[in-house]
Image: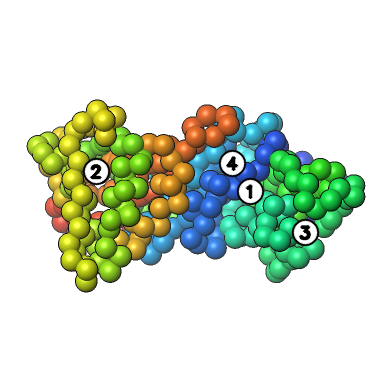
Amino acid sequence: MTAVHGTATEFVPMLFRAKLANVRPLVNMLKTISFRPRARCIISPDGLVFAVEESQCLVAQAYLRAELFTTFSYNVQLAEYYRNQEQEAFEDEVSQDGEQSDATQVVLPLDNLIECLTLFYGPAGTSASSTQSSSISATNLYTSGNPGDLRGATTAVIGFKGPGADFELMLEERGTISQCRLSTFVPEPPVDLRFSHYPTTQQLIIQSKWLRDAFNELDPTSESVHISIASTEPHFRISTMGENGSTDMTYSNSERILDSFFCNEDQENQYNLSLILKCKQALAMSDKTKIRINQRGFLSFQFMIPTSADVSFVNFVFAPLVSADEPVAPATARV
């Protein structure tokens, strides 16, 4: 890779660099969206967003604020330089949903990223040398001789020099340091569910324990799940119909169950159950869940997950099988 200025032998500055005192919060967040092998990583001054897509009907995003990291550095000027260099390639991908214009996007092998981050506390004490593949290289740089069963917090320094470069990680735990490099890929235009393009007609915040109970009762043989939010009781209803019969979970607007409730328009929509169930891991880690439905019937689950720094968020957006008003147009661009 050539330098930004001058000859190819000059030092290439880091576009992004951050340090984590403990990788576990990052790993936990990544695992909530790990049902796809690759993820789009969006880097901005505010932090990182990892996003995956499924069947053009689901987009899942894990948000990691800059405050979650011990140090977080993003070179906005260098990012602008790279964008100018690639202006022709990306001129049709201008954000229409509020995404920051100074963000950098790159696609990473999500499964390999999680594998790297868990080198020191994976199954059977996985070592760096056992994780090499076509998209990952790992090197054990130094070992202090500590017994393998003495495990502490794994710290990490992660960095990215820019388009075409590898995603770099340096992990350290109890004197053992390993360096990993992940191959990166050019992002394709993301799927467009355009939740924010239409007004939100219904919104509630529910304690996640109630939603977990509902998910556990859903009939897995059902192809779809009905979700209804209404201004009259039952205010919130989830139901399925499968080989084992019907399941109907209803909730009233009670302070014991719902932290907040808003319904501007009664609406019931149908969603693919197998896609809805992909958010179970995020639901299991969350304290509360914000549920929103817009005028087109698109469904948003925003899971509030406590971390050492603050609350992090994982957001799932689903397209309905049948829209509230009309058939859903094919997804083509951004969320």
Q: CA distance from mark 1 to mark 4?
A: 35 Å
Q: Is residue 71 above or below residue 222?
A: above
Amino acid type at mark 1: Gln
**Label 2 SS:** strand
Q: Would residue 36 appear left or right of 302 to someone viewing this image?
A: right
Whichever of labels 1 and 3 marks the residue nearer the N terminus, that label is 1
Return the mark for residue 128: 3
**Label 3 SS:** helix
Whichever of labels 2 and 4 marks the residue nearer the N terminus, that label is 4
Return the mark for residue 147: none
Nearer the viewer's eye, disc 1 or disc 4?
A: 4
Amino acid type at mark 2: Asn
Q: Position of residue 146 (x, y in %)?
A: 86, 48
Dot 1 and dot 4 residues touching (CB under 8 Å): no
Q: CA distance from mark 2 to mark 4?
A: 31 Å
Amino acid type at mark 4: Pro
Q: CA distance from mark 3 to mark 4?
A: 20 Å
**Residue at position x 19%, y 33% in the image:** 253
Q: CA distance from mark 1 to mark 3?
A: 36 Å
Residue 37, by quadrant, is bottom right
Q: Is residue 93 above or below residue 313?
A: below
Whichever of labels 3 and 2 marks the residue nearer the N terminus, that label is 3
Which residue is disc 1 drawn over? 85
Q: Would residue 269 appear left or right of 132 to someone viewing this image?
A: left
Return the mark for residue 25: 4
Dot 2 and dot 4 residues touching (CB under 8 Å): no
Q: Would residue 184 appear left or right of 61 to someone viewing this image?
A: right
